[in-house]
Amino acid sequence: MGGALLEGLVARGLDPRRVRVQDPGPPAEVAAMLARHGIVAEPAIERLPEPPGVIIVAVKPQMMDAVFPHAARLAGPGTLTVSIAAGRTLKSFETHLPANAAVVRAMPNTPAAIGRGITVCAANAHVNPGQRTLCDALMAAVGEVAWVDREAEMDAVTAVSGSGPAYVFLLAEALEKAAVAAGLEPALARRLARATVSGSGELLAQSDLDASALRQNVTSPGGTTAAALAVLMADGGLEELLRKAVVAGEGRSRELAK
């Protein structure tokens, strides 16, 4: 995710010479991207000519306690720290940073890799309007940006938009398997499932209609779609399963924050 964000920022005009990356072992695709832009991933950044304007923390939450205290030493009183580590609270960052440090907790999602993500942000009390605008500009490099006033809402955000792409991919996977079970060749089943999910998503993105209206537009009374939806919308069907899934994800996000 950090690599996708950096790629988007450079594409929007960020000078790679203004970037320092701390990563002792970046994945191959990230290393290749850094090399294209002339950026060297450093195992540890010991010092900088001056405190950075922004520190973006893009590591897995379980690695945070091992790597963040070192990076935090580079922060100055005017540094904005932006975290995209799932489940880690604003307070967990504040304990490592100078007093009154500005911190934003952000939750992007994987469509950021193609510039179609959505990131939700929560700020601590020390983030000023200019820093909020800066964070908006940074995260807009990979898609839409939204804000919540209460950090507690980030657990639900994580379960909905953070994890949500996996639910959509599961839908495509299940639709492909159902198509094969209905007698279609696997290659055609895969093509139909992927095109249907991606095309429907694009239609939803471009339409002013609610999702329910788009669904109704496909559904003729007594037709094939109505018969299928009767199964999906029955008690215990898709709506209830998704509600349970979001509750489970929200609960896990709270556990990770402890």
Image: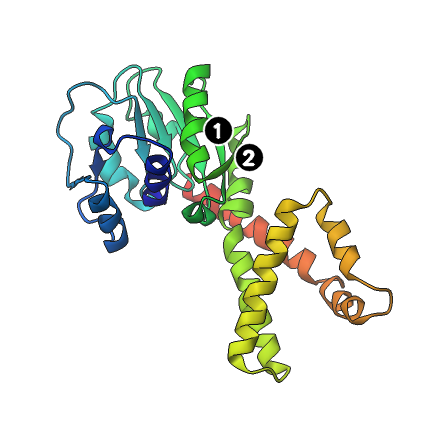
Q: Earlier in the sequence, mark 1 or mark 2?
A: 1
Q: Residue at x 42, y 36 (%)?
A: 141
| Label 1–label 2 contact, CB within 8 A | yes
Tell us which disc is closer to us: 1 or 2: 1
Where does the C terminus fall, quadrant-wise?
Answer: top left
| Residue 14: % across, % down | 31, 31
Query: Real-space Cα distance between discs 1 and 2?
Result: 9 Å
Q: Is residue 99 left or right of residue 38?
A: right
Where does the N terminus fall, quadrant-wise?
Answer: top left
- Disc 2 residue crowd, few under 14, some 14–19, many 20+, Cα 10 Å: few
Q: Which mark is residue 189?
A: none
User: Label 1 amino acid?
Assistant: Ala
**Residue underneath mark 2:** 153
Q: Residue at x 34, y 29 (%)?
A: 93
| Residue 45: % across, % down | 15, 32
**Residue underneath mark 1:** 122
Quarter of the image where one finds residue 9: top left
Q: Residue at x 21, y 24 (%)?
A: 74
